[in-house]
Structure formats: structure tokens, C-alpha cells
Amino acid sequence: MRLKHCHNFHDFQTLARRRLPAPIYNYIAGGADDEVTLRRNSESFNRVDLIPNVLRGVEDVDLSTMVLGQKIDLPVYLSPTALQRLFHHEGERATAAAAEQFGTMFGVSSLGTVSMEELARKHRNPQVYQFYFHKDRGLNSAMMERAKSSGIKVMMLTVDSITGGNRERDLRSGFSIPFRLTASALMQFALKPSWGLNYVTHERFSLPQLDAHLDIEGDSLTIGRYFTEMLDPSMSWDDVSAMVSEWGGPFCLKGVMSVKDARRAADIGCTGIVLSNHGGRQLDGSRTGFDHLEEIVQAVGDRVEVMVDGGITRGTHVLKSLALGAKAVGLGRYYLFPLAAAGQPGIERALHLMKAELVRGMRLMGCTSVDQLTPEMLRRVP
């Protein structure tokens, strides 16, 4: 299979699986425990039907929207994800450039492999910095100041990862940073020599947001131990409230799921929340963001911007989310598999397909702008 033969998410996933060593593929594809939530994330969209309107005159379709104080040309953004240069040597450079081509927002992770400063300097499209809450409060403040100095306008704090999920695919393969692979996993790397050649012939792997605090080269702290030793499970609403004030700009919480927490986020001055179960990689058996979207929007949609991610593989998934009140929809694996398959051209093809699906879907729904999508256009499947 070649890139031009990829026509949907599943095609990109197949191509990525062929090109990646199995431990790295499974790191992207896998979830926590029995992967129940991972499967439900996409399945949840099948439980809602679209009710189209006809004869509405929809020659021109406007997909743009405002989110977190920034205008984007598509109602989807590329969620911050870790370790991207493991999947393809271009990593976040490909992600940022592809997002810029389509006029949308992208996120940079604390565990990103390209510095936030480089990406902010090179690209004019909106950039979000995603970080975790550390035991070292000085480190938290330093990371926010660094993001502010680079020109980043939006801060996104992940609140569903105070400890790492039980990802058994990684346990079986021995996947970790630095690599500590089982014998069978090493064989899988040997079977994909092109990935290995790219990995060793490009710049040394690093985590520039954390290099001063996480010595992966000296093997003093692995990624797994980073979650268990450096992140602070005692993080509280008082801590977050102080960070919102310290940041002084658009502040978003990623991983909020309950109505009570959504109201608390609005109370402390958060600009937005992302309904997310971390792609099914944290608490298995948790509710999907899409299934809980309507209730959250009804509770706080007039006070805080609500976004959602998890399991989005089609334009119709995005339309259903927007109809329930989401301001925008985050893409994760949807762009990571294309990145792994072909770098920047892969992500651009995936976004081209998404945009085409959105335009086609909007026309068939009888809508010329995303604000015309409403809950009345949906019905729950009995």
C-alpha cells in the first residue's frame, strides 16, 4: 500500500503498521487494561444518527470557528501527543507544518520531541502548550513562563494523568524511553530496518521541553518513572486556580469528564475544557467524551468552551460533536498514523480527506456554517 491508496483512517493505520516496529505501533494503537474504553470511543458515534435537512442552498460551506480566542479554518485541531519523532523522524515539525497548511491549531506536549520555541518561531498558526502538573512547583511556573516567552497564547493542563495507565501492550514488548525491549521486540525492530535507519541517521532523540529535568540519555529516569515520580497526584483545584491566575490568558483543562468538575473549571476562570479519556489509555471503563458531551454542554456551555476528543475517525463524527455543542474536536491517532506512515505528506492527506468529508457532510446536512449544526439534527439509536 502507498500513501495515494489511503482513503480513510483504517488505511493509514494499516500503512503505519507495515512501516513501524511492532512495539512502537502498539504504543500508538494501544489502550489501558482490556482496552474497553479504547473501543468504545469510536463505537459511541454509531449510537447517534444524523437527521439531514434538504433544499437549503449550500453551495458555499464555511468550516471556520473560534476556539480559545483563536480563529481556525477547520473545526478540528491536532491534539498534543508525546514522542512524535519516534513515529517518524519529522515528528512535531510535520504536525505543525501540516496544521498550518490547513489553518488549524496544533498542540505541543511536555513530552514532545521538538521544542515549543522552534515551532512557535516557524509557524503562524495557533499553538497550544500541553503540560503535566509536577511536584516541583517551580518547574510548573518555569514551563508556563517559557511558553509565554515563546509567544504561545493557550495553556492546556492535562488532569487525567496524575499516574500512568496500565498499558499492557507496552509491558509485553518492554517499550519504554530509553528502550528496554524484550528479545521478541528487538526482532520486530530488526524486521523494519528502514525505521531504524531513519532513527539513527537523524538528530538524536530528545525531549527538549524536559531535557533539563529528565535525563533519558543517562537513564536516570524513564518515561514510566517520570509519571510516577515527578508528577504530583496531590494536585488540587486550588493548585489549578493559582496556575490559571499566573498564566493570565486562555487556560484549558484536558481530561475533565464530570459535570461537577466542568462547573468547577468554569468557577476558577478556565477558558475551555476538553472532554477526554486520554484515548482510552488511562482509566479503562471510563465514559467516552462524546457520550457525555451533551450533558456537559447543557451544564456549562454558556460559561466555558467545551471541546472533545477520543475515537474521531470520520467527518461525521466531527459533525455530531459540533451539533451537540463542541466548539472544536481534537484529533489524535487520526493524524499519528498518517505521520508514522509518511510524515508531513501523510498528515496533509489525512486532513485533506477530513476537510472533504466535512464539506460533503455539511452540504448533505443542509448547513453552510458549523454554527447551524444543532442537537435537533441528531437522534439516539434505540
Image (spheres, grey):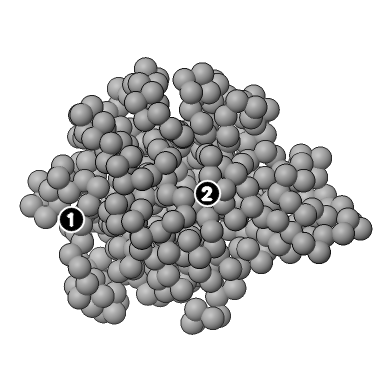
- Whether residue 41 is visible to the viewer of this picture, yes or no, is no
- Residue 348 place in picture, x, y as percent: 50, 69
Mark 2 touches mark 1? (CB < 8 Å): no
- Residue 1 place in picture, x, y as percent: 49, 82
Instruction: Judge from the rendering whether residue 56 lies leftward or rightward of residue 349; answer left or right.
Output: right
> On the rendered image, what quadrant is the C terminus found in?
top right
Q: Nearer the viewer, residue 306 or 72?
A: 72
Instruction: Judge from the rendering whether residue 172 lies leftward or rightward of residue 34; answer left or right.
Output: left
Q: Which residue is mark 2?
A: 330
Q: Nearer the viewer, residue 101 or 39?
A: 101
Q: Earlier in the sequence, mark 2 or mark 1?
A: 1
Q: Which residue is mark 1?
A: 178
Q: Amino acid at mark 1?
A: Pro
Residues at marks 2 and 1, CA–CA distance in whole angstroms: 28 Å
> Dot 1: few (<14), some (14–19), or many (≥20) neighbours within 10 Å?
some
Write the residue at 51% across / 18% down.
267
Write the residue at 38% across / 23% down.
245
Write the residue at 48% across / 23% down.
269
- Residue 58 place in picture, x, y as percent: 82, 60
Q: Amino acid at mark 2?
A: Gly
Write the residue at 26% across / 75% down.
198
